[in-house]
Image (cartoon, grey):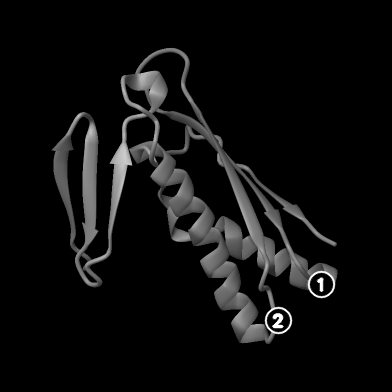
Amino acid sequence: MVKVTVEYLGNLRCKVTHGPSGVAIETDAPGDNQGKGELFSPTDLVGAALGTCIETVVGILARRKGWNVDGMKVEVVKDMSQTGPRRIASLRSDVWMPLSLAPADREAVERAAHTCPVHHSLHPDIDAAITFHWP
């Protein structure tokens, strides 16, 4: 169990504190939804969670296999719905791998990314495609 505390600071800003570490970040409403868009929005954090989750599970696999994946990069592009209730419509991820692997190992890496807990937690209506770029 991990406790996260959120405090409303006013003007559509929130302070989020991670219980175990005490580390805090702030969020802002996006510019297209009455905010200033100066900080991560709540839905931006979902994209950040997906990208970091992909890197973490690939990093765990790489550690187990003895591969160095330092420099791996994930770019997540978030699009919001244009109709109906405001929600995340897509979180498309591009993963740039810093090393070349055999086809079976590439498949294992891609399978790991698709099984990260955040990817599994997303609503099935969200387009959450993951594209890998290999050297």
Residue 116 position, x and y percent, is 50, 60
Mark number for residue 49? none
Q: Do the residues bearing badges 2 and 1 touch, measured as CB atoms within 8 Å?
A: yes
Taking 94 as reference, is 50 left or right? left
From this view, report whether residue 33 is shown above or below residue 106: above
Give the position of the N terminus as an image quadrant.
bottom left
Residue that sits furthest to the top in the current view:
83
- The crowding category of the residue bearing disc 2, from other C-alpha atoms within 10 Å (few below 14, some 14 to 19, many at least 20), is few
Give the image quarter of residue 11: top left
Residue 58 position, x and y percent, is 60, 69
Taking 39 as reference, is 65 left or right? right
Query: Which residue shows up at 68% across the image and 87% down it?
Result: 66
Q: Is residue 93 visible?
A: yes
Give the position of the C terminus as an image quadrant.
bottom right
**What SS does tag 2 mark?**
loop
Mark number for residue 67? 2
Query: Which residue shows up at 49% across the image and 34% down it?
Result: 126
Could you tell me how far apart the alpha carbons at marks 2 and 1 are, in whole angstroms? 9 Å
- The crowding category of the residue bearing disc 1, from other C-alpha atoms within 10 Å (few below 14, some 14 to 19, many at least 20), is some
**What SS does tag 1 mark?**
loop
* Residue bearing mark 1: 101
